[in-house]
Amino acid sequence: QVKLVESGGGPVQPGGSLRLSCAAATSIFRFNVMGWYRQAPGKERDMVAVIGLGGNRNYADSVKGRFTISRDNAQSAIYLQMNSLKPEDTAVYYCNSYPPNETSWGQGTQVTVSS
């Protein structure tokens, strides 16, 4: 059973924007803090942004002021608006609960920032 489906990635030039979407199974989304994570080649997967049930947010220092996480509780979905993208943002982006459910990772969506 697919529990998390990410979409919206792609190639973008430095300074550009992308909006990622995540459709989550209700069993994961309903009572959980949700988050976006990313994994760059050769690196560990890191938390990018998290959002609580009431909308409180936290961000990794590297994306503060550039990325915005949001959630739609009715749709069991979360989003990541990414602005002012940099080459170092290149990674596969994943959504999951926070802390993550290690058995539920999806395929992720590739974001490539390059000129």
Image: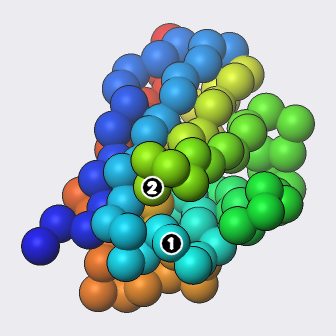
Q: Secondary structure at mark 2?
A: loop
Say how many tags the image has. 2
- Residue, far left: 1
Q: Quick check: marks 1 and 2 in contact, CB under 8 Å?
A: yes
Q: Amino acid at mark 2?
A: Ser
Left or right, 115 with respect to 69, comes to left
Which residue is more in the foreground, 11 or 57? 57
x, y percentage for residue 89?
A: 59, 40
Q: Residues within 10 Å of mark 1 (few under 14, many from 20)?
A: some
Residue 2 position by quadrant = bottom left
Q: Residue at x 50, y 81 (%)?
A: 100
Give me the residue at 30% from left, 78% from top.
104
Q: Is residue 101 visible?
A: yes
Image quarter where the N terminus lies is: bottom left
Q: Position of residue 50 (x, y in %)?
A: 69, 63
Image position of 67 with respect to 113: above or below:
below
Q: Which residue is mark 2?
A: 76
Residue located at (66% from left, 58% from top): 48
Q: How is the image coloured?
A: rainbow
Residue located farthest toward the front when viewing the structure as drawn: 74
Give coordinates of residue 85: x percent, y percent: 65, 26
Residue 41 seen from this side: no
Residue labelled with disc 1? 30
Residue drawn at point x = 50 percent, y = 50 percent: 74
Pick whichever, 72 or 47, lies toward us: 72
As drawn, 92 above or below 95 = above
Amino acid type shown at disc 1 = Arg
Earlier in the chain: of badge 1 and badge 2, it is 1
- In this view, 99 is above or below 63: below
Question: SS at mark 1?
Answer: loop
In the picture, measured across the screen, residue 83 lies left or right of residue 71, that is: right
> Compared with residue 32, is residue 13 higher up or lower down, i.e. above or below?
above
